[in-house]
Image (cartoon, helix red, strand yellow):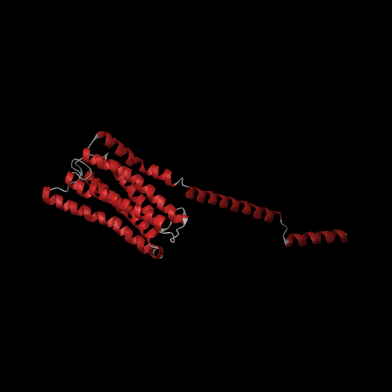
Amino acid sequence: MVVPGLRTLPGLNTMSTTFSLLCMQLTYMFANAVEKSSLFCTVIGILLHYFWLSLCCCLFTCSLHMCRSFSDRRGYSHIHTNIKFIFGRYVIYCYITPIFIITTNIILTYYIQNKIGYGTTLCFVEDFVQNLATFIAPLLITCVVNIVMFTITVTNINSVKHIEKSKKDKSELVIFLKLFSLTGIVWIFQIVDGVLNISAFSFVATLLTSSQGTIIFLSFASSSRILNYLRSKRENKGKKEINYSKQTTRKGSGTSPLDLTKSTQAQGSSITI
């Protein structure tokens, strides 16, 4: 939000994705620390499941927007004239869809097993079938769909010559590719860990999940676009301070009309004497 150039629809999508990622990491940290078979563990498990699914939806909207942006020039212009409306629809999809999935999972699990399926032995989805259907399957579907849409996007960029995109649009595509690649690697370890339950994969998955925020910060905050903006802002601030000091110096060294009148009167009186 500090950089005005990033307050575009792709920039808002990126911020929404990083927000879901941050919330997922926080709940993931608590899920590994709280006591099992407790109400807090159940709540944390549901929240962790929710933010995992919202992260999937956010990444899907990012890739969908980029695919539409680079595929249809008219559609791209239409999107940019309705940023608030389109982003509102994205937010509703990203943060309401997981509620339906989790609610359905709880109802079915309670009907079949007479329990909600969270917080007894694990602060997450406990049953393997429910875990496969409501967690692993969405991750795999999101990965496959995103790869397909990114492939279509890159193909359109290379094949359609008359559609010219700015460097800003292409840099946003690179940002989404980096973000999806980072989260995709973590998802692979999460899926392997959930299926095989191997301690080595659990350690690597936990390490990658916990360090995603740091990696994203180092990757995006140190980009040339952000650094150039901060550099230009610092230079403009320095120029303003120099101009202000010069104006202050001029005002301090200048002589007011009242001082000139007083000096003239003093000179006249001395001549008369």
Taking the image as shown, residue 24 lies to the left or right of residue 238, namely: left
> Does residue 152 sit above or below 197 in this rendering?
below
Can you give x and y, in whole percent of width and height, for residue 198 in the image? 24, 35
Q: Is residue 51 visible?
A: no
Q: Is residue 217 visible?
A: yes
Quarter of the picture holding the C terminus: bottom right
Q: Quadrant of residue 38?
A: top left
Can you give x and y, in whole percent of width and height, for residue 206 in the image? 30, 39
Can you give x and y, in whole percent of width and height, for residue 75 in the image? 38, 64
> Does residue 119 sit above or below 158 in this rendering?
above
Quarter of the picture holding the N terminus: bottom left
Viewer-nearest residue: 183 or 106: 183
At x 38%, y 47%, the residue is 178
Viewer-nearest residue: 217 or 81: 81
At x 35%, y 44%, the residue is 182
Can you give x and y, in whole percent of width and height, for residue 56 in the image? 29, 51
Viewer-nearest residue: 192 or 11: 192
